[in-house]
Amino acid sequence: MPFRLLAVLAHPDDESFGPGGTFARYADEGVDVHIAIATDGAAGSVATGYEEARERLADVRAVELVQAVEILGATLHNLGYRDSGYINDPANEHPAAFVQADLTEATGRVVRLIREIRPDVVITHDETGGYFHPDHIQCWRITTPAFHAAGDPEKFPEIAAPPFQPQRLYYTALPNTWLKIVVLMTRLMGRDPTKFGRNEDIDITKVGVDPGSIHARVPYKKYFNVKRKASAAHASQGGGGGFRLPIWLQRQFLSHDNFIRAYPPLPDVDKEHDLFAGIIPADNQ
Ligand SMILES: [Zn+2]
């Protein structure tokens, strides 16, 4: 049996703009990669030329997501929530918005996926959500308890699939050293790094974690173009082109993904370079 990986991420595009290189690499290496996206992306911004798609954005993004996940070589799952907006966005008030979800019920959706897929490794956003997006933080909020509950027969007994405990939990992380370069480049390009992104609502001077808190750096240089291709599938989101960094610089810095190992705790010694190092597939044990 191959290793299995489950990532629980917030939006259609997080799988590609985020650790897409890692997913492409593991899928190519024979890992059974599963990507669960929590929301429909309906509250996302739209790229220039996609203004008319505004009203049917969830449908447009669903199609883009299917393409992107196929390019990465993974299997797609949807948690089925409505996209919440960024901080203070009125979309957060929608009763179906992911941030309004009942936490126990939402945790159960992830427990069900874990019990059905039986992943060795689970990945989700960290508690900052990367850039403080409420949906990203919500993924962390439900996936962390789901990881610990999935193997406990007394938790969520109504889920028919048998209890299963994954071996490792990782959070995606952006080291702020890297972001300091982005802040510098942004300033050099005459833009304000406190008003980053298409909606100019992200302060990237506050984004990122201390590099000392990063446990795993997974190289994916060989899969840079797969990640780019998957990102490009999200055309209504600008296909990653909104990043506005020259390709040579992206290739330089987008060569590995960073993760914090949430479980089991890792003594702060050598960095990991492979999320599966030292474990054997659960169903081979
Ligand atoms: Zn997102």
Image (cartoon, grey):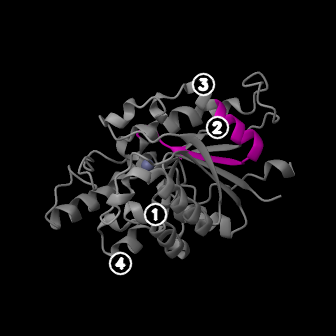
Count of marks overlaid on the render: 4
Which residue does the image show at 16% across and 66% down from the upper left? Answer: 188
**Residue at position x 37%, y 53% from top?**
54
Taking the spot 16% from the left edge, 55% from the top edge, the residue there is: 192
The Cα atoms of the two marked residues, 3 and 1, are separated by: 31 Å
Q: Position of residue 93 (x, y in %)?
A: 38, 29
Residue at the location (32% across, 47% down)?
207
Disc 1 residue type (three-letter): His
**For marks 4 and 2 on the same chain, the one whose residue lies earlier in the sequence:** 2
Alpha carbons under labels 4 and 1: distance apart: 21 Å
Nearer the observer: mark 4 or 2; the answer is 2
Question: In this orientation, which residue lies closer to the viewer: 126 or 66?
Answer: 66
* Camera-side mark, 2 or 1: 1
Question: Of the residues shown, which amino acid type is indicated by label 3?
Answer: Thr
Cβ–Cβ under 8 Å for marks 3 and 1:
no
Image side of residue 235 versus residue 262, left or right: left
In 3D space, how far apart are the residues under numbered discs 2 and 3 (Cα atoms)? 10 Å
Q: What amino acid is found at the position of numbered circle 4 in the picture?
A: Trp
Instruction: Describe the element under mark 1 as helix, strand or loop.
Output: loop
- Residue underneath mark 2: 110
Q: Which percent across, then down, holds residue 253?
A: 39, 68
Q: Is residue 59 highlighted in magenta? A: no
Per the image, the residue denoted by label 3 is 104
Closest to the observer, 36 or 248: 36
* Dot label at residue 107: none
Q: Is residue 9 left or right of residue 109?
A: left
